[in-house]
Amino acid sequence: MQMKRMNFIFPALFFTFFSGIGTISAETSCPGIREKTCKDGKNMKIVVMSDIHVMAPELLKKEGKAYSEYIAGDRKLLKESSAILEAAVAEILKQKPDAVLVTGDLTKDGEYVSHELVSGKLLRPLAANGIRTFVIPGNHDINNPHAAEYDGDTSRRVRTVTPEEFAAFYGDYGYGEALARDTASLSYVAQLDGNVRLLAVDACRYEDNDFAKNVSVVGGRIKDATMDFIISQARKAEQDGCRMLTMIHHGIVRHWKWEDKAMADYLVADWKKCRRIFSENGLNVVFSGHFHAQDISVYGKGKSAVYDIETGSTVSYPLPVRNIVLDGDSMAITTWHISPLMKDSSLDDKAVHYAREAIASIVRGLTDGALPHDIVEEAAAVAGDAYVAHIRGDESMTEDDMKKLKATVRKVRKHSFKYAFILDHIVRYLHTDQDNTGDNDCIISPGRADRSR
């Protein structure tokens, strides 16, 4: 989640604050990963990671003002990113899944040296041990003017990568074995096993990045030509008797009420149309990332249901990784966390602090001069609680949470009805898991998808 560049927009208000898995629903229990051989989508084991945001260590030549200012606006465990991914890969090697999916934002800001590190070293043990790994780019990864090195008080731009270089770097991670490639983007299709295919969708807008203005576009969109590719490949998969799993960086289904108003950059543009097209073409399961949150959200009913399984970041709280087991038409989903595997026992605390401070800085910037300092800090704390609950997943607003919110809203309302309204609604929506799906551990299976968003 790129906190320093997100815009919260409301009407008249601004708050900078498988084809064919079939009809599916979620239950609140989930078995462990099963030790069976993958065959035609039965007991196939998949690991999903997202937003690994690796920063090559040599980019931080000397700590100082320049890096501090960057991290203050984009709070991630960047210095620990390589060690975190190494720990995750070591654990994945023990689990021996059939495939690993990484749903974008492989690097801090698309630095050439970071891509070298990720593709050439950090993910290499997976390939070396026969675990097939598939990636797509995120908004950070290509043609990024924010690619930089930090040396005390100064920062300097460093080489980023082109789309062609990205595909070359990750030839061993999907692009080299693609059954089909989209000519309008870095989207592709790959065969996971005898009857399961992967549709990897590139919805990033790296061609719109502006080096002169130092702008890296956060939002995403699916080009018309790419959507044609998606539809044709979904139909081909159906003709070939294959089920299709999809991965994409940006969301297709909103994960909390007002996300499309407050944080639209975390959904693809025209997301309602996109999710309808996915639904009509049997693209029922979508693995996404971008928001750095653990959340499973569903749109539609019956065979038209689309599940957007959003996975949090390995460099943000709670450092999650998903395990998926396909067993016929059902999927068992479990979550494990990287922090217990690390030598640094304070990693979770640091990650939670980063998450809270990211929200606090937004609240402070929004309300500067409009509210007394003590009320601003109280509002920031309440908003921080809600954000941490949402990114952890399985959020539920307790009676104590509600009391704190109401008390803070009353204080804010004395100074600004607008900010009180925004705070009240954003906190409630972030705290509310509307689908009751089970964001971390669940089973989704045919025939009972009955919720609509």
Image: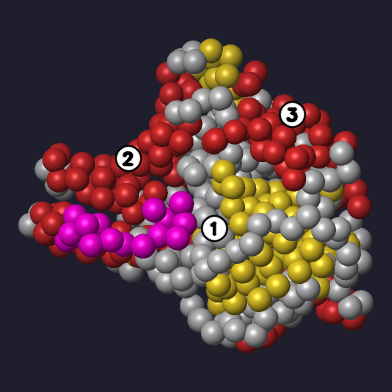
Q: Is residue 160 above or below residue 200?
A: above
Determine crowd level at label 2: few under 14, some 14-19, many 20+ residues with C-alpha closer than 10 A: some
Principal secondary structure, stretch drawn in magenta: helix
Give the residue pinned by disc 3: 117
Q: Residue at x 91, y 52 (%)?
A: 177
Give the residue pinned by disc 2: 361
Q: Is residue 310 above or below residue 72?
A: below
First-in-chain label (1 vs 3)? 3
Q: Is residue 238 left or right of residue 113?
A: right
Queried whether the magenta region covers residue 393, the answer comes back as: yes
Q: Position of residue 2 (x, y in %)?
A: 49, 44
Q: Are marks 1 and 2 in contact (CB under 8 Å)?
A: no
Queried whether the magenta region covers residue 194, the answer comes back as: no
First-in-chain label (2 vs 3)? 3
Q: Is residue 257 left or right of residue 241?
A: left
Q: Are marks 2 and 3 in contact (CB under 8 Å)?
A: no
Give the residue pinned by disc 1: 440
Q: Position of residue 451 (x, y in %)?
A: 51, 81
Q: Residue at x 51, y 25 (%)?
A: 344
Magenta-colored span = 389-406
Q: What is the distance, in whole Å, between disc 1 and disc 2 at their CAs? A: 28 Å
Q: What is the distance, in whole Å, between disc 2 and disc 3 at their CAs? A: 32 Å
Q: Amino acid at mark 2?
A: Ser
Q: Are marks 1 and 3 in contact (CB under 8 Å)?
A: no
> Camera-side residue: 65 or 433?
433
Secondary structure of the residue carrying tag 3 is helix
